[in-house]
Amino acid sequence: MDNRAIGVFDSGLGGLTAVRRLREALPGEDVVYLGDTGRVPYGGRSRETIMQYAREDFAFLMGFDIKAIVVACGTVSTVALPEMAEDYSLPVVGVVEPAAKKAAELTKNGRIGLIATRASVSSGSYEREIARIAPDKQVFSQACPLFVPLVENGRVSPGDVVIETVAREYLAPLREKDIDTLILGCTHYPIIRDVIADIMGPGVALIDTGGEAAAELAAILRARDALSAGTREGTCRCFVTDSVEGFNESAGRFLGGGVINETQRVSLN
């Protein structure tokens, strides 16, 4: 047994969708969450800047007595994680491998779509991982740079003309590719899952990358006998690099009503 907390980080609020799934799977675990809300989004940054931000995020979480890290940021998972994960002895789970594995399992026609930030799409990480585990599958990628700022600003509901117009434009090329599985390659995207599902139709399975990462970490901790020994509900402590008030006002829709025990503003540099 291991009563230490699990660390989770993202560029903003989106990683809370992974925290939600993690707490559903492991309700007794404490979570320390870092949202780099002062520098969101990461997806349009250079590789050098993303690497710098990722190192600062890792360093902050390693200042706590944590037993594992979930990299809930799709951009960091695709651009920085392959290089950085080897620097840490504790389990580090990103969103790419678990989601790629799930997509390969679910697709029936072998045609998989990916929506993500520009940096994630440019990295080719999902294509390489799917080619490794299922070389007969095809991946069609689409960058969606406006999704994160729209989600962060609450433009998320079906019927909202802004998010629906943007989503239809982004998703049109993937509809033409006859995909039957779509990876939501950023943890912000499950917040607009209903919008995406309406556009793509019932024949397309949607993969929640944060949820798959949470399931992967839960399996790792169980295999290592590293789950918390307590029977109480786990706590969630959040740290942000911008307004605490703005974060707390928006966090509920990402957590699905889950409780945040504490929120503090911090500086990473």
Image (tube, grey):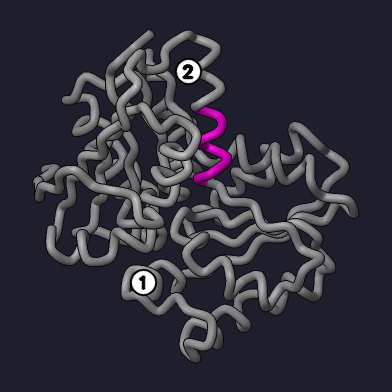
Q: Are marks 2 and 1 in contact (CB under 8 Å)?
A: no
Q: In which quarter of the image is the C terminus?
A: top left
Q: Where is residue 90 in the image (x, y as percent from the top left)?
A: 38, 16
Bounds of the magenta segment: 210-217
Relative to the observer, which residue lies in front, 262 or 242?
A: 262
Q: Quadrant of the N terminus?
A: top left
Question: Residue at point 23% right, 25% down?
Answer: 62
Relative to the observer, which residue lies in front, 15 or 117?
A: 15
What type of secondary structure mainly makes up the magenta span? helix
Q: Where is residue 159 in the image (x, y as percent from the top left)?
A: 52, 88
Image height of 227 relative to 247, above or below: above
Q: The residue under label 2 is which amino acid type?
A: Leu
Question: Rounded to the nearest whole Å, what is the CA distance between mark 2 and mark 1?
Answer: 33 Å
Image height of 27 relative to 115, above or below: above
- Left or right: where does residue 27 sit relative to residue 218? left
Q: Where is residue 88 in the image (x, y as percent from the top left)?
A: 36, 18
Q: The residue under label 1 is which amino acid type?
A: Pro
Question: Residue at point 58% right, 57% down?
Answer: 184
**For mark 1, what is the residue?**
149
Image height of 187 relative to 179, above or below: above
**Is residue 30 rendered magenta in the image?**
no
| Crowd class of label 1 (few under 14; some 14 to 19; many from 20; radius 10 Å) | some
Say whether disc 2 or disc 1 marks the residue closer to the N-terminus.
1
**For mark 2, what is the residue?**
221
Secondary element under disc 1, as helix, strand or loop, is helix
Quarter location, residue 104: top right
Question: Residue at point 26% right, 39% down?
Answer: 236
Residue 192: mark: none
| Crowd class of label 2 (few under 14; some 14 to 19; many from 20; radius 10 Å) | some
Q: Position of residue 3 (x, y in %)?
A: 30, 16
